[in-house]
Amino acid sequence: MKEASEKEQKRILVLCVDRDDDLGAKAGVKTPVVGREENLDAAVSLALKDPEEPDANAIFEAVRVYDRLKAEDKPDEVVEVATLSGSELGGVSADRKVVSELNDLLGSFSASEVILVTDGYSDQAVLPVVQSRVPVSSVRRIVVKHSESIEETAALFWKYLRTLVENPRYSRIALGLPGLLILILAIFSIVGFVQYYVIAFVLVLSVVLLVKGFGIDRMAKGFYTWIKEYSPPPLRVQISNFSGIAGALCVVLGVYLGWTTAAPEVSLQSDIAGYLGILPRVAGFFITGAISLIVVGICVALLGRAIRWYLERDARLLRNGALIVTVAWSREIFLVASDLLVGSAGPERVVFAILIGILIGVVSVLVIFVLHRRAKEFFRETEEQVEELAEN
């Protein structure tokens, strides 16, 4: 019967946890501290060493809760009060010490439930640790003179400070920029140019603001990553791309030469009719100066595509060849047209050049079909290419 009654009793442990070990560091008290008188002595010792220490008030609160439970005098409850401490280092070391002391305490007093008393933000972190060993029926947090807010603010401040120091993304600005400015000040002091430090300060700060504001650092990093991971395309694609770039440059130079050739013919006029009167002559000189390089540029771009399609055995090679011949002959047509605009040629030359161009186009189409039939096995065509060629 006696054993049965002991099993039915609730064994309640009023537990105060000092996770950062202020009790040992300031008062020299070793934990665990078990018993009412022992906890009172420990709290008084800590309060005498540091009257502003909230852990002393937490121990007094644990004793108060213990006295209240004892005053209820319930025969089915056995109550004990104890204080544990962690480590000044915090983190894993503190939690491991709390677990070790809790296991020793539960070995001498096998509690069925715990009433946990803490002094604020950091000590509440031990709640999961205690709950993993014994059920926690209540948690009491003692806040003295807003110590909770101060403690949380301090923890948040140190968290952000650690991020600024340890995270390279933020340390470059938070530490690197002030360090650079201090280094410049030191160098200017050595060489005797301190009077120019304000100019250097503004210059460095403006460069940093521009780089961060316009994302130049991110663009440079992306460009470096692209260069590092870049793999050149196949040779046939490179030939096509480079010929396209070369052709575009030729066209731009042709336009420039055309403008320089036509510029001397441009003069101030009194009205719009005057400008319309000189427009044909200006256009003629522009065409004369520009058309050669423009045609060369277009032919170079088409030739690059022709080489690519030849290497790919693409049937569009034949049509591209005909297009090159037509574009090349168009130079003669434009030159004759420019002479007509300038007044040094008659319209019959223009008509003759156009007829010759039409004949060249017809002959090119016939040659395409002949070559296509003879070299049918050389080209690897898709159905869409065959239909497109037939339509053309």
Image: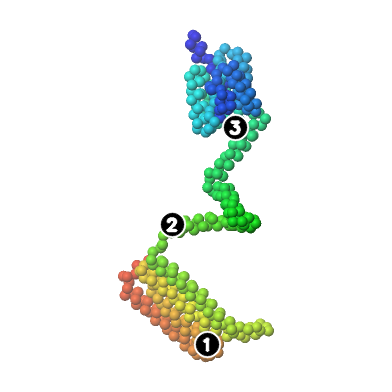
Between circles 2 and 1, the one closer to the viewer is 2
Where disc 3 sits, the SS reads loop
Residue at the spot 42% in from the left edge and 77% down from the top edge: 324
Residue 65: percent from left, percent from top: 61, 20
Where disc 1 sits, the SS reads helix
The circle on residue 339 is 1
Residue 32: percent from left, percent from top: 53, 22
The residue that label 3 is drawn on is: 121
Q: In the displayed structure, would residue 20 be above or below residue 175? A: above
Q: Out of 102 and 238, give the one closest to the viewer.
A: 102
Where disc 2 sits, the SS reads helix
Residue 229: percent from left, percent from top: 43, 57
In space, the residues marked 2 and 1 are separated at their CA atoms by 53 Å
In space, the residues marked 3 and 2 are separated at their CA atoms by 48 Å
Mark 2: few/some/many CA within 10 Å (<14, 14-19, 20+): few
In space, the residues marked 1 and 3 are separated at their CA atoms by 92 Å
Q: Amino acid at mark 2?
A: Glu
Q: Is residue 285 visible?
A: yes
Residue at the spot 56% in from the left edge and 82% down from the top edge: 262
Q: Amino acid at mark 3?
A: Tyr
The residue that label 2 is drawn on is: 229
